[in-house]
Amino acid sequence: QVQLVESGGGLVQAGGSLRLSCAASGSIFSIDSMGWYRQAPGKERELVAAVTSGGTANYADSVKGRFTVSRDNVKNTVSLQMDSLKPEDTAVYYCNARIATSWRRRFGEYWGQGTQVTVSS
């Protein structure tokens, strides 16, 4: 079955940078969108950034101008370059992808296990 594995989380100071990466593997026929969500303690999971199959990127207003999402359709990966990090960016970040496992199947939602990003002030 499909797996999404994240890497790149960690602890950084405010104003610093991190780059998150996510690799999809397994029974993949086609991938629609790929992106990143995050969830802070006591808050709901929210969209951070995503890339459509056509290459259009969408961002949460809170990260526009600071984060950049990119996608490699050959490697089935999506990355999130995070610059000018703020303490309020602290959260668990989850990779997300809509994937079809065969030509007969609908796209389904798949999630990574999450990676912790902590920004200190």
Image: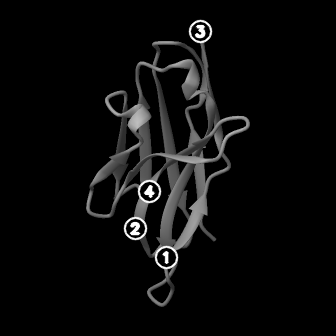
Helix, strand, or loop for circle 1? loop
Instruction: Give the labeled residue for mark 4.
Output: 34
Provide residue 101's location: percent of width, then percent of height: 52, 78
Instruction: Give the spatial CA distance, label 2 vs label 1.
Output: 7 Å
Instruction: Give the labeled residue for mark 2.
Output: 32
Mark 4 residue type: Met
Q: Residue shown at 55%/47% (left/top)?
A: 46
Provide residue 7's location: percent of width, then percent of height: 57, 38
The residue at the far right in this view is 42
Instruction: Give the spatial CA distance, label 4 vs label 1.
Output: 12 Å
Q: How is the image coloured?
A: one colour
From the image, which quarter does the N terminus lie in?
A: bottom right
Instruction: Give the labeled residue for mark 1.
Output: 107
Instruction: Give the spatial CA distance, label 2 vs label 3.
Output: 37 Å
Instruction: Give the spatial CA distance, label 3 vs label 1.
Output: 41 Å
Tell me which numbered mark, 3 or 4, is placed earlier along the sequence: 4
Provide residue 111's location: percent of width, then percent of height: 61, 57
Mark 3 residue type: Ser
Q: Are marks 4 and 2 in contact (CB under 8 Å)?
A: no
Around disc 1, counting alpha carbons within 10 Å, would you say few (fewer than 14), some (14 to 19), or many (20 or more)?
A: some
Mark 1 residue type: Phe
Q: Residue shown at 48%/67% (left/top)?
A: 98
Q: Are marks 2 and 1 in contact (CB under 8 Å)?
A: yes
Taking the image as shown, residue 19 lies to the left or right of residue 40, namely left
Q: Are marks 3 and 1 in contact (CB under 8 Å)?
A: no
Taking the image as shown, residue 54 lies to the left or right of residue 16, namely left
Instruction: Give the spatial CA distance, label 4 vs label 2.
Output: 7 Å
Helix, strand, or loop for circle 2? strand
Instruction: Give the spatial CA distance, label 3 vs label 4.
Output: 30 Å
From the image, which quarter does the C terminus lie in?
A: top right
Dot label at residue 121:
3
Mark 2 residue type: Asp
